Image: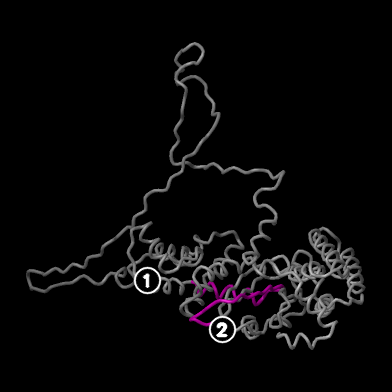
Amino acid sequence: MGRSELERLSREELIELVLRLQRPEKTSRTSSKPPATDRKEQREHSKPSGAKPGHEGHSRVLSDDPNTIVQHRPEACACCGASLHAALPAEIVSVFERIELPAVAPIVTQHQRIAVQYPSCGTRVVAPVPKEAQSTPFGPRLHAVATYLKTFQALSYKRLQAALSDLFGLTLSQGGLMNLLRRAQGCFHPSRDAAIAMLRKAEVVACDETGVRIEGSNAYHWLFHSAQAVVHTASPTRGAVVVREMMDGHRPTVWISDRYTAQQGHAAEHQTCLAHLARDVAYVVEASDDPVPWRLQLWLGSVFALAERVTHLAASTLSAKRRSLDRQLGAILATPSCCDLTRDLQAKISRARDQLLVFLAYPGKVEPTNNGSERLLRPAVVQRKVTNGYRAMWAAEGEAAIRTVVDTARLTGSSPFSTVLKTIGA
């Protein structure tokens, strides 16, 4: 805005402009921005990390089946110097374990085809091609290690190439690695399809998405999850068509997400993420002296406190508390305000009013926030930041299939590498 335009503004408009310029910047506490974007001085005044006072410490659990046990016995009495022979009773007073990794080297099995000439007729007989020579020269464990490091440790092709060389003495080109990973990804498609089938039967589904670069263009990594399945998928669009294709006509009882338009209308009821709403409220509290945002913050505090004990209360009690909270919210939303930020916040909450307390009707089944989706998306976000996305769509789709199978298996306690190895070796 130039000087001439400023001169044409009225006194009230100038005051409003100055007030807008004085508003604080949004941070991770008052918006959906990641903590890494916060200014250094803000991070310096944040709460200290590490264990809090009164936290009970934990030590490493000793092995139940050590490879070797070495007992250190005293040889002589410290008082009289007499020999302490092995037949004397003894007890263990302390245990210390030293742990080491063995040197890992690839096991190379060379298959040689032999030709033999029969002396009587002179026929030269060549052994048939063994099945091991009819496929890739790399075994399932090598496929699993490369897949695990690429997908779950976010290594680029160059760093993966170096890791395999430094740790295992394997020399693979980046093209060879790409072919290896593409073969491995194909093993996950059946289990991915099974996870999608479970998702399409779920009563409660949560969803979220994040941006990613694929083939040099902006695209999106979508996440859907229920109590039984976690499904990742890559798509060039952020539109509702992704949800419709994933659900294939299935309408869950409850859908959990933020207020993004593409996430609306996919279930009988919708639970809006209250964590997103709480950050919006926190910003208006910080930027304005209006009492309405402060009242909304207190109201959200009551909702979160109730959510922590929702499974311990009777249905009638929850119903009564829901009606009470709704009345309180109605009064707050009806309070007049001269602050534009407050009015915008009231309008936003009014539009989502019937989606704020749905979780109280489904204790233990529906969460009041979509934090579960954000936690499941975080590894994909880390991968995006470290590697800057994917060179090809097949790589993005293949990694989504791997994450689908591994995250679904995690629901039953399986570890990522064991799931990867089991799937590739099946």
Q: Residue at x 74, y 83 (%)?
A: 265
Range covered by the magenta-colored residues: 188-217
Who is closer to the viewer here, 259 or 141? 259
Compute the Cα span from label 1 to label 2.
Answer: 26 Å
Q: Mark 1 — residue?
A: 174
**11 versus 324 height, above or below:** below
Q: Amino acid at mark 1?
A: Gln
**151 versus 1 height, above or below:** above
Q: Crowding at label 1, few (<14), some or many (≥20) Cα neighbours within 10 Å?
A: some
Sequence order check, earlier mark of 1 and 2: 1
How many tags in the picture?
2
| Residue 200 included in the magenta stretch of the image | yes
Q: Which mark is residue 64?
A: none
In the rendered image, the quadrant that contains the N terminus is: bottom right
Give the quadrant of residue 109: bottom left
Who is closer to the viewer here, 360 or 217? 217
Q: Residue at x 85, y 66 (%)?
A: 294
| Residue 410 included in the magenta stretch of the image | no
Give the quadrant of residue 243: bottom right
Q: Amino acid at mark 2?
A: Pro
Q: Crowding at label 2, few (<14), some or many (≥20) Cα neighbours within 10 Å?
A: some
In the rendered image, the quadrant that contains the C terminus is: bottom left
Who is closer to the viewer here, 80 or 125? 80
Give the quadrant of residue 114: bottom left
Residue 190 pos. (x, y %): 51, 74
Residue 368 pos. (x, y %): 76, 67
Q: Residue at x 78, y 86 (%)?
A: 7
Residue 186 pos. (x, y %): 46, 74
Q: Mark 2 — residue?
A: 236
